[in-house]
Image (cartoon, helix red, strand yellow):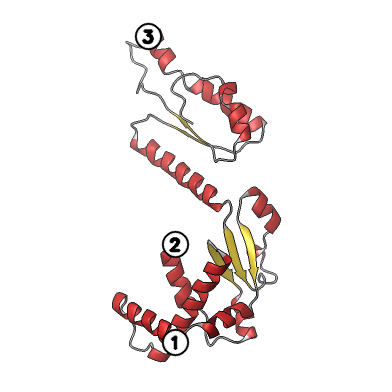
Amino acid sequence: LIPLRYAASMMTVPALLDTSLPIVIWNTQEAYEVARSYTSDDLLMNHVRQGTQELTNVLLRNRIRFGLESGHYADAPALDRLGEWLAAARAMQSARGLRVGRLGAPFEGMGDFSVDEQRMAHDWGPEVAPLPVDQLAACFNDARTEDAEALVEQDQARFEVAPEVEQEMHVVSARLELAMRRLVAEAELGAFTMNFREIIEAGGVPTLPFLGLNKLLADG
């Protein structure tokens, strides 16, 4: 929201109460300073702040979350701060409907991994998609060696591969990458996490899919 002059809150509040979009308010004005030549017309054309205060009070009363930035429209630091708010709004919007694959159960006893999944989906947006731990092994077994060898050739062309990385282990990791990509595609995931202990205990894969995970991160 960029009010260009004083705007009474009820001009916009009904629409804001009805939207699911993130809200960022940019409190700015055309005049850079109040100089001796400042007139009543200048006041009318730059009378933004009072409307901003009124609007934010009404939003707070209705428990509507919003971002707020103030500063002159040509002030570089203020624009940088506004950019941070817009990036946060974009991240919030992209999180809605995001499916997060979770291979295995959360780590027992670790509070930072403990999330109320229903509340997260309701308040923020991401939906957890539990994946059976043996699904990775099944996809790994289906991955073709010739496809993995093609990935290895791509890796060798793109990266500086340490000499101690043996070709056989590189092919195994490439097959796991193919398995990871299949999991992501079939479950329509936008993010992924895993319980590495459960994967190790379940067996079925010769190593953990760290190469594939890093390349998925690189792909976004």
Which one is in front, 91 or 132? 132
* Residue in the picture at 61% in, 80% down: 199
Any mark on residue 39, and which? 3
Q: Which residue is mark 1?
A: 145
Choose mark 1 or mark 3, whichever is in front: 1
What x and y, as percent, mark residue 123? 65, 48
Using the numbered discs, state the Cα–Cα distance from disc 2 to disc 1 in whole angstroms: 25 Å
Q: Within the image, what quadrant is residue 33 found in?
A: top left
Query: Which sits earlier in the primary sequence, circle 1 or circle 3?
Result: 3
What x and y, as percent, mark residue 12? 56, 26
For the image, the number of numbered tags is: 3
Any mark on residue 220, and which? 2
Query: Which sits earlier in the primary sequence, circle 2 or circle 1?
Result: 1
| Dot 1: element | helix
Decide if residue 160 is on the left or right side of residue 55: left
Visible residue check, residue 57? no
What x and y, as percent, mark residue 146? 41, 86
What x and y, as percent, mark residue 219? 42, 65
Q: With respect to residue 51, does 42 lie above or below?
A: above
Choose mark 2 or mark 3, whichever is in front: 2
Identify residue type, mark 3: Thr
Using the numbered discs, state the Cα–Cα distance from disc 2 to disc 3 in whole angstroms: 52 Å
Image quadrant where one finds the C terminus = bottom left
| Dot 2: element | loop
CB atoms of marks 1 and 3 within 8 Å: no
* Residue in the picture at 38% in, 37% down: 79
Using the numbered discs, state the Cα–Cα distance from disc 1 to disc 3 in whole angstroms: 78 Å
